[in-house]
Image (spheres, rainbow, N blue to C red):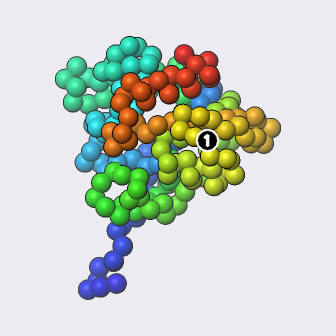
Amino acid sequence: MTDGFSLFPPVELHPLQPFLPEGAKLLMLGSFPPQKKRWSMDFFYPNLQNDMWRIFGFIFFGDKDYFLFSDKKAFDKERIICFLTKKGIALYDTASSVRRLQDNASDKFLEVVEPTDLTCLLQRIPDCRAVVTTGQKATDVFCTQLHVAEPPVGGKSPFDWGERSMNLYRMPSSSRAYPLKLEKKAEAYRLMFRDLDLL
């Protein structure tokens, strides 16, 4: 402590509840949401500079702007939720609380204070047979906690969890900081969705 101020950044608690639709077959795990000032909606992957929902729109509807409002200033949360519920895709993050070591959304500068209890999360979605991590930090936390071999980017690793035979998919980050064109990222996701009979 110096002059009454901590030398460490404040701890941020996860601002969202897990999105776990009934019958979910796939669990998508990121690291942690960006700062609220970067949100365009109150849901996962809310930053307009993140291309996750453009990847989904491109793959499933042939339109990268499908999940954007017509003014393209925000993602359409209700349209996204309806789609994910219909497809059986759950969402959460591998960190329940973090410190941001820099004033940005980069995983590189996220310190995980409390990892998510992934065992508890999987117990809540008994039909889930696959998990996808969408960045290196999320992959590291998942593999460490559940003792799974890390797959290559665009690949998968089989693992057993209880009586379930599952696969961990490692997809390219949807952040624009990850140096790969949207169409190339979408192709990796497309192969995964086909593999899971979701496409």
The percent position of residue 141, horizontal first and vertical second, equals 57, 53
Left or right of 194 in this view: 36? left
Residue 146 placement (x, y as % from top left): 68, 50
Residue to which mark 1 is pinned: 151
Residue at the image position 30 percent from the left and 54 percent from the top: 104
- Which of the 4 quarters of the picture holds residue 123? top right
177 shown above or below 113 = above
Quadrant hosting residue 184 = top left
Relative side of 151 to 185, left or right: right
Tell me the amino acid under the disc marked 1. Pro
Residue 124 shows up from this direction: no
Hey, which residue is sitting farthest top in the picture?
62
Secondary structure of the residue carrying numbered label 1? loop
User: In the image, what residue occupies the spot 26% across and 86% down?
Assistant: 3
Q: Residue at x 76, y 40 (%)?
A: 160
Residue appearing at x 39%, y 47% in the figure: 33
